[in-house]
Image (cartoon, grey):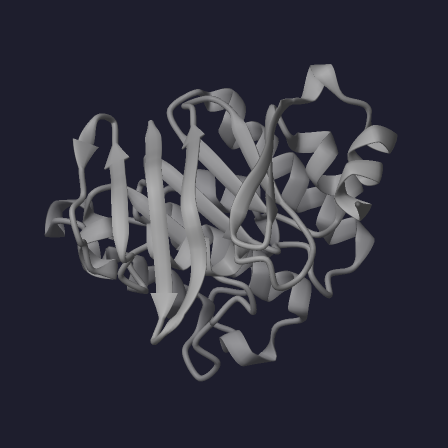
Amino acid sequence: MLEIQNLDLKYGQSQILFDVSVSAKMGEITTLMGNNGVGKTSFLKAVAGRHPSSSGTIAIDGAGLGRATAFDAARCGIAYVPQGREVFPMMSVRENLETGFACLPKSEHVIPEEVFMLFPVLKDMQTRRGGDLSGGQQQQLAIARALITRPKVLLLDEPTEGIQPNVIQQIGDALVTLRDRGDMAILLVEQNADFAYRLADRIFVMERGRIKDTLVKSDISKDALLELLSL
């Protein structure tokens, strides 16, 4: 569903990504792992259209995106859940969800009931301001808002950061449900190795802006992966 080939990315004169190729299949959770500062967030921003790549190609279901803006990428089926959540603090939960309508035709301006099935706490908090939610509730809201766009590809950047364990479990269960539905590719950047390994079908390891290893989870134990990440 998502195919990135030979992606380079620069901030000014500094090159951040070097010849990065990553793919994510429908009905799978693909994880991108690596130490802090190796370029994982920059990679997701490039795929989501938030920062233009210097070279390389990004394709959704075989269709190249070119140098798409964030709006173009969203309309083509890429939903991005950023690190830090970026919930609108003064808007209600429902209003935050409705911002996902921006890239949809008016006939689809409906919040699917599945969103509230995945994250029941949001149904009871629709009138509460986003800024009044806990960190875990905001993370669920950020993921739910991304799902409003009916994505083909869901990008998540550190969804467990600063989140209490019971909510991490709920988020993991929701992602498994979305994967098993079979109509979406999920690309997860995550420092929580236990969470990432539990969910992953395939694993890409990044080091200094390059893909160092491409792994199938069944071929590597969690301990071996941790050892690889620490090298």
**Left or right: 180, with 191 as reference point:** left
Residue extending furthest toward the top: 218
Image x and y of residue 150, in percent: 31, 41
Image x and y of residue 26, in percent: 41, 23
Residue 109, visible in the rendered structure = no
Residue extending furthest toward the bottom: 90
* Residue placed most toward the observer, 41 or 126: 41
Question: How many labels sit on residues?
Answer: 0
Residue drawn at x 44%, y 74% is 92
* Residue placed most toward the observer, 164 or 195: 195
Snapshot quadrant of residue 84: bottom right
Quarter in which the C terminus is drawn: top right
Residue drawn at x 61%, y 72% is 133
Residue drawn at x 68%, y 22% is 217
Quarter in which the N terminus is drawn: top left
* Residue placed most toward the observer, 158 or 205: 205
Image x and y of residue 128, in percent: 52, 74
**Left or right: 94, with 220 as reference point:** left
* Residue placed most toward the observer, 98 or 188: 188
- Compared with 173, 133 (above or below) is below
Residue drawn at x 31%, y 64% is 51
Residue 1, visible in the rendered structure = yes
Residue extending furthest toward the left: 106
- Compared with 190, 23 (above or below) is above
- Compared with 120, 139 (above or below) is below
Image x and y of residue 169, in percent: 74, 43
- Compared with 67, 128 (above or below) is below
Snapshot quadrant of residue 95: bottom left
